[in-house]
Image (cartoon, rainbow, N blue to C red):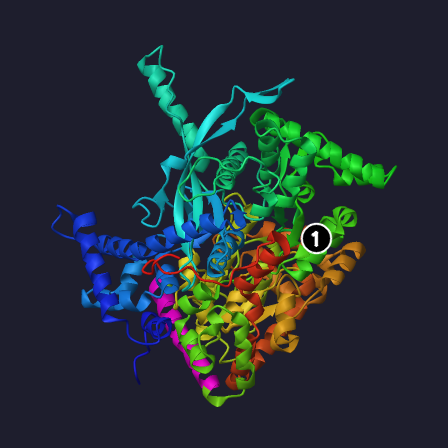
């Protein structure tokens, strides 16, 4: 049998559809050697593998720079409306491979590196993940940047250059242990420091009112140093910018009373200032009201708005002298998108600049602010919504507290005029929450201060309108929209699953890579024997690679012919990894599923370091795996594996979960998952979905047909009815013998014989305090999994459903999502024209 092509060889076939030009290869080789010998190695005699990687990264970056400069020139010359995407998280992953694919350089680089006696995939492995995000929120932001560049929008991503990103996860004796992610320790060849645009950010101080206006005085200053990273579009020569801010202490040591102790103290104070950008907060869907976090949120907003206004005032490329003095046209030239509530301070900060600095009157400033800002809501969980103590604002941002009070007063006056005497409505809609600790509701501030508010899946947007922000929707229904999330097909198909991409290209051409709706052309081919064979073969090759990885990394041998049932989610109670655990224990008690349906449930992803129950769930998964994987009776019919330190580079690697998965678990309680994007990645890569009618699953079922997914469990209305009636877990426990057996085993220490009481608090939660109703869906879930088993035993029918799912996944492209944002929220139609390559003369 012929040896399967490597992922690199597959991408070569697609990215250029032929051999690279000899000139391109020679140019890459020449640039590589120049960087290796003159930039990196210099006086050293021996180059390391990291030197080779850096030489290649600099070579690819050289191809970016001309396009990057020309793109920015075009923006200044044509002065389009600019889009600013503000996010505290950008989960970019690795850059080298994505850049080569988007520039069409993959083939030339692969050939040049081969001629130099090196292996391209080995060099790609050296790059550190830029893990500047916790999960879906940050990965979505990264997909959006890719799509904005591919669509040619004049867009900028703004965030924080965290010195330490999402922690490295180690599993020690079944428990999660966190290690710092020092991703910058070898430097970052993709970023460019821009000290000429360093900006001051103020904290603390006092507010002084005078006839001339309001002044914020006696503040502490931290400097924001920008680092720019190029974001290339797919084969269109557009290169946008992601600008991340790093905190630097100012150099004005007050050392007139010089002594050694004073000097040391001054240096240590610098470290305190620079802690602002030191580390990414690792909590996902959980609000932790720490002062450092609030500093981070204001730091990125304050620096970004100064930068936006500087760019608005300038018009010529490279010119820093202001030419615009009126802010009348600001909303026509600037759109600010707030990615969740973390950048909510953009609203009072823009008001402060307009009113205090630019001397715009309050009414006009508020009109400008609302027309400029838009807000994306990402969660309906009450514990995830940001509510900052007023006392913290009073100390850290006193002027902004004044402004928020003023915004809230005018807002409540407006509500009172429309709903006279409705005091309870005023309380519900206030930005300031009264109580023992007065708090500022940042979501309410975002809704009030934005012209558009959107959810990220249709069912989520409906919950936002009818529940989370019901009063605000009744006040201003026109501002509420839906923008269903999407993923970039370049990274999540062409890059991570080149075998499948090649199979699709052979049938319908390459157009789907920039217009994913073209996958619909596969629908007439669902029954095509050759396509069924090829899709099944690609999946099997990916599973063989995945099996080899599992054996190498975890010492667990799995049969590549078995079903790969994957649950890729951040660990959280609402995502219901515990429901999956109960099903695995049930299968184990039945002595494994039927032959042919074997491998079950790799459980990747981390728990937040302070989230006790999530860490217990990880321990439970690993403990179940220890028993199941070593049981000679079960043998190889059931395996449970937890993928340690799962991150973007693992998800996109050809041998790992997305391309290899047969079944994708999307089993959150209906009404709790905003959208999900992992569900879309698995659908696009040929996995079938088992899930509840939650998040984007609803639209996936609509697109592919509910009969082509495995849908089970309570709907949103059922969950609401159960809440009204009262959820009693003991009723299910007493009625369902298999559930009772599984729960009792977990509770008694069957899976933790050395610590028999280890999981008693997990069982206590499930029986007495489970907000997410795991037991209520257990019976339907187990029955649905039986349907999965039955279909998997018919490979042809299974693969036909896989092809139908792929063909119907076109809606879930981030290109479609961004096009909708641009037209409906930002008022910036994506341009049809491309940026000319730097080799051509300018117009």
- Residue 318 lies, in percent from the top left, at 39, 42
Quarter that holds the C terminus: bottom left
Secondary structure state at the residue bearing disc 1: strand
Quarter that holds the N terminus: bottom left
Left or right: residue 423 compared with residue 55? right
- Residue 546 lies, in percent from the top left, at 39, 69
Can see residue 639? no
Left or right: residue 155 compared with residue 102? right
The structure residue drawn at horizontal position 79% and vertical position 34%, both measured from the top left corner, is 413
Who is closer to the viewer here, 161 or 616?
A: 161
Residue picked out by circle 1: 480
The structure residue drawn at horizontal position 22% and vertical position 57%, both measured from the top left corner, is 31
- Residue 235 lies, in percent from the top left, at 40, 64
Q: Disc count in the image? A: 1
Q: Quadrant of residue 657?
A: bottom left
Who is closer to the viewer here, 461 or 192?
A: 192
- Residue 82 lies, in percent from the top left, at 52, 49
Left or right: residue 163 compared with residue 438? left
Can see residue 491? yes
Q: Residues within 10 Å of mark 1 (few under 14, many from 20)?
A: many
Q: Name the residue at the front extreme.
A: 843
Q: Is residue 677 magenta?
A: no
Who is closer to the viewer here, 43 or 240?
A: 240
Who is closer to the viewer here, 582 or 455?
A: 455
Q: Specify start and end residues of the magenta stretch as a single range.
A: 531-553
Q: Name the residue at the right extreme.
A: 421
Where is 582 relative to 302, above or below?
below
Magenta-colored segment: predominant secondary structure: helix
């Amino acid at each position: 049998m012929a040896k399967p092509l490597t992922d690199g060889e597959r991408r070569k076939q697609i990215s250029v559809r032929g051999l690279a030009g000899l000139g391109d290869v020679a140019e890459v080789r020449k640039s590589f050697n120049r960087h290796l010998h003159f930039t990196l190695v210099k006086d050293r005699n021996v180059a390391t593998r990291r030197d080779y990687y850096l030489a290649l990264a600099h070579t690819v970056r050289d191809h970016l720079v001309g396009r990057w400069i020309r793109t920015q020139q075009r923006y200044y010359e044509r002065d389009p409306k600019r889009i600013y995407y503000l996010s505290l998280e950008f989960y970019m992953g690795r850059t080298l491979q994505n850049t080569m694919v988007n520039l069409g350089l993959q083939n030339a680089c692969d050939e040049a590196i081969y001629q130099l006696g090196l292996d391209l995939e080995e060099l790609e492995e050296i790059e550190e993940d830029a893990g500047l995000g916790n999960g879906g929120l940050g990965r979505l932001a990264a997909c959006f940047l890719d799509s904005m560049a591919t669509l040619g929008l004049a867009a900028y991503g703004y965030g924080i250059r965290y010195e330490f990103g999402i922690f490295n996860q180690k599993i020690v004796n079944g428990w999660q242990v966190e290690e710092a992610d020092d991703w910058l320790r070898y430097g970052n060849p993709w970023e460019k420091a821009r000290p000429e645009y360093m900006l001051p950010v103020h904290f603390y101080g006092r507010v002084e009112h005078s006839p001339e206006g309001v002044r914020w005085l006696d503040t502490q200053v931290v400097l924001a140093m920008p680092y720019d990273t190029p974001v290339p579009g797919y084969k269109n020569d557009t290169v946008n910018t992601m600008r991340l801010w790093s905190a630097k202490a100012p150099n004005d040591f007050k050392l007139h009373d010089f002594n050694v102790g004073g000097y040391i103290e001054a240096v240590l104070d610098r470290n305190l200032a620079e802690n602002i950008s030191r580390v990414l907060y690792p909590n996902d869907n959980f609000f932790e009201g720490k002062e450092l976090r609030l500093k981070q949120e204001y730091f990125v907003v304050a620096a970004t708005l100064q930068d936006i206004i500087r760019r608005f005032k300038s018009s010529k490329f490279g010119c820093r002298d202001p030419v615009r003095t009126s802010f009348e046209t600001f909303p026509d030239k600037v759109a600010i998108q707030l990615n969740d509530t973390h950048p909510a301070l953009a609203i009072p900060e823009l008001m402060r600049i307009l009113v205090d600095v630019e001397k715009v009157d309050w009414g006009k400033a508020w009109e400008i602010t609302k027309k400029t800002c838009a807000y994306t809501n990402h969660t309906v969980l009450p514990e995830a919504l940001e509510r900052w103590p007023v006392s913290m604002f009073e100390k850290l941002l006193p002027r902004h507290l004044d402004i928020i009070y003023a915004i809230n007063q005018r807002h409540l006056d407006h509500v009172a005029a429309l709903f006279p005497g409705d005091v309870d409505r005023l309380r519900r809609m206030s930005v300031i929450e009264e109580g023992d600790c007065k708090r500022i509701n940042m979501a309410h501030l975002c809704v009030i201060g934005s012209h558009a508010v959107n959810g990220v899946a249709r069912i989520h947007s409906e919950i936002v309108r009818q529940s989370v922000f019901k009063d605000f929707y009744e006040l201003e229904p026109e501002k509420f929209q839906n923008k269903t999330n999407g993923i970039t097909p370049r990274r999540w198909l062409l890059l991570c699953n080149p075998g499948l991409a090649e199979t699709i290209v052979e049938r319908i051409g390459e157009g789907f890579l920039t217009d994913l709706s073209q996958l619909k052309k596969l629908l007439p081919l669902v029954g095509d024997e050759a396509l069924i064979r090829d899709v099944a073969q690609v999946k099997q090759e990916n599973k063989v690679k995945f099996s080899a990885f599992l054996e190498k990394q975890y010492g667990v041998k799995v049969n590549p012919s078995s079903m790969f049932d994957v649950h890729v989610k951040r660990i959280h109670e609402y995502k219901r990894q515990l429901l999956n655990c109960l099903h695995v224990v049930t299968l184990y008690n039945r002595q494994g599923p039927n032959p042919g349906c074997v491998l079950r449930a790799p459980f990747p992803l981390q728990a937040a370091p302070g989230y006790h129950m999530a860490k217990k769930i990880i321990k439970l998964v690993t403990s179940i795996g220890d028993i199941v994987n070593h049981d000679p009776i079960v043998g190889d019919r059931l395996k449970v594996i937890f993928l340690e330190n799962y991150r973007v580079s693992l998800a996109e690697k050809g041998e790992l979960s997305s391309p290899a998965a047969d079944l994708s678990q999307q089993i959150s309680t209906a009404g709790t998952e905003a959208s999900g994007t992992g569900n879309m990645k698995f659908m696009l890569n040929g996995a079938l979905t088992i899930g509840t009618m939650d998040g984007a699953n609803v639209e996936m079922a609509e697109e592919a047909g509910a009969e082509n997914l495995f849908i089970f469990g309570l709907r949103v209305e059922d969950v609401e009815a159960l809440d009204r009636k009262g959820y009693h877990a003991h009723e299910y426990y007493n009625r369902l013998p298999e559930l009772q057996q599984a729960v009792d085993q977990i509770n008694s220490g069957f899976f933790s014989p050395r610590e028999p009481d280890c999981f008693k608090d997990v069982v206590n939660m499930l029986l007495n305090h489970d907000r997410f109703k795991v037991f209520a869906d257990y019976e339907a879930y187990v029955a649905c999994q039986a349907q999965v088993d039955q279909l998997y035993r018919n490979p042809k029918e299974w693969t036909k459903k896989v092809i139908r799912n792929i063909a119907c996944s076109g809606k879930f492209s981030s290109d479609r999502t961004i096009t909708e944002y641009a037209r409906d929220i930002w008022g910036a139609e994506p341009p049809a024209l491309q940026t000319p390559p730097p080799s051509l003369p300018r117009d």
